[in-house]
Image (tube, helix red, strand yellow):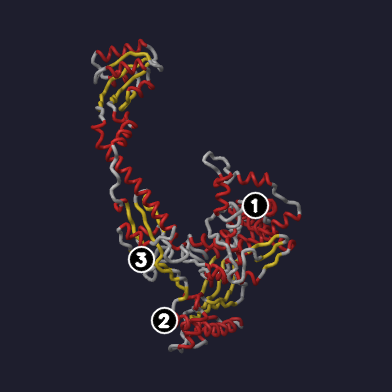
Amino acid sequence: MLEFFRGLMKSKIGVALLLAFLGIIAFAFVAGDMANLGGVGGVNAGDKIATAGERSISASEVDRSSRTALESMRQKDPAQTMKSFIAAGYLNKVIDSLIDNAAVASFGKRHGIVAGDRLVDSELLKIPSFRGTNGNFDANAFRAVIQRDGYTEATFRKLIADDLISNQILRPASLGGRVPQETVTRYASIASESREGSIALLPAAVFAPKGEPSAADLAKYYTAHADAYIRPEHRTIRYAVFDETVMKSAPAPTDAEVAARYNAAKATYAASETRKLTQLIVPTEAAAKAIIGELAGGKSFDAVARGKGLLPQAIAAVTKDAYVTQSSAIVADAVFAAGQGSNVGPLKGGLGWHIVHVDGIMRKPGKTLDQARGEIVAALSADKKRAAFADFSERIEEEFNNGGSLSDVAKELGVTLKETAPLTADGKVFGKPGESAPAELLRAMQAAFAADKEGQPQLNELVAGQTFLMFDVAAIAPSAPAPIADVRAQVMADYALEKGAAAAKTAALKVEAAAKKGTDLGAAMAALGVPLPPVDRVIMRRAELRAPGQAVPPPLALMFAMAKGTVKLLPAPNNRGFYVIALKSITPGQVDPKDPRLANLRKGLSFAASREYLDQLRTAIRNEVGVKKNAAAVSALSKQLTGGN
């Protein structure tokens, strides 16, 4: 929705979904891949992915929003692919956000909540991208921007209208959320409580099978878990850097061109005189004459001025014409007629009576055409060479656009093409930690990884008008699981951990059952008869849970979510084993109802309540208008999107 609503989107769905949602509204303008769907894989651009009331969401909308969200995620993690995007569930989240938007628009239409053309026009006027050089709305700029991002004018205006309707409906629901003071106090007491319990770990490695698995078992495991061994897409890039040294000498300037340059800059070559001055301006002639008298008596200009409480004005390297604007023609004539070291005045100017000391005279002799010819020829030659180089670079780009090859252009320029090691999208050398792409290539990595296929040369300006990079993609290795032979040791270790984790769970269930009957957790662990880490006895306040910059360990997080006297199992991440957590006691925290920190806590809880009201309203709107999702079309689109990666 609008700015307020976009802020609310950050909670349950996450940053990536927020970016996907922004891809469908007019204010985003994120440069995503706007490629149209063409029916490959059983889904067409116009096919309905979902409906919400009278509105439908097409495959092309989902495609555009998903690609936009993925590109946004790649800004932080270049290794992200459409396959990983979909595997993480973001495609469904994008679809859900589009459904929400359509449902709210449909609900608004049913209840007479509209955004008229004039209101939409007022929103368009606020968007900077649509303004011309004069700062006003420019229809041509508007059409150029929306066409670039794949919208028609009608579609774009509908998105703006939907956005305004959503704001009218959803924003009021999020205002005024209030939480009772008793709830705030109770929450604060929970936040300051302390708990006592025990945490036991049964490592998978202890229960892992000994010896190597059979080749068949290992292959079966690898096939089932191939996604865990995906290597990021990597590309080999051919490139060359060149500058104007590749150019043959440009045509020499003609006499007519030299004369024209001289005449155009005649003032530059004319004789000139500038003067360095110190002046005082006083309001009366009498005061000025008194100062001149003291100067004539041998006092310095500075001493006379300071003796009268005045501050001299220093004027550096001024021409006569410039000085006229600061004084008057009479004053300037007199000052520029005086010799160096002279005191001039008193003379009447626009601001009062001037007394001026000529500190220095700098004269620059003029130059005739013949005298200036050398520097003019050098300047014209440089200009011609730059112009020829600019034309040359444009011709190269045109040649690339018309299907020319990188090798042919390199041969024409007389430069040698270099080829990189395989690179990932973040500019790192694939398989070689610590190694990166050459510095001159880093700015071109995004363009190189946006290329559809190998052999599409591009030109990139490194230094404006001076240095260029030309490159193409020599080879593309798509993101895919590594061959089992390359990762066999890792697969074997993971296989052993999975088997060990299963056995650890069986043992953990025995420990849990014993602990629930009152057996001490340490004794229940010892009864297993295998060497295990000692049980951790924990006494901790909730406030101590989160150390600055560190995540809460999952076993502790669970211990602070359990009921008193209960025992829970928790799998360790990555098949590392199982935890058994037993909570012995809970000591509530003591909170002073007058604690000033409760005010801020109440604001935070009220905001959470407002957000919950908003979620409930969206759910109610969905239920009222009716929402349907085409599972077959979603599946087909998912396959089509990953097929492109």
Q: As drawn, is 96 to the left or to the right of 276?
A: right
Q: Is residue 539 visible?
A: no
Q: In whole angstroms, how far apart are the C-alphas of marks 3 and 2?
A: 25 Å
Residue to which mark 2 is pinned: 485
Within 10 Å of disc 1 (Cα), the crowding (few <14, some 14-19, many 20+) is few
| Mark 1 vs mark 3: in front | 1
Rendering quarter of residue 379 = top left
Within 10 Å of disc 2 (Cα), the crowding (few <14, some 14-19, many 20+) is few
Numbered disc 1: secondary structure: helix
Residue to which mark 1 is pinned: 154
- Indicate the quadrant containing the N terminus: top left, top right, bottom left or bottom right: bottom right
The kind of residue tagged 2 is Ala
Q: Are marks 1 and 2 in contact (CB under 8 Å)?
A: no
Residue nearest the viewer, comparing 308 with 270:
270
Residue nearest the viewer, comparing 241 with 550:
241
Query: Residue 630, position in %: x, y?
Result: 67, 69
N-terminal-most mark, 1 or 2: 1
The kind of residue tagged 3 is Thr
Mark linked to residue 420 = 3
N-terminal-most mark, 1 or 3: 1
Name of the residue lying farthest toward the right: 111
Query: Residue 30, position in %: x, y?
Result: 54, 55
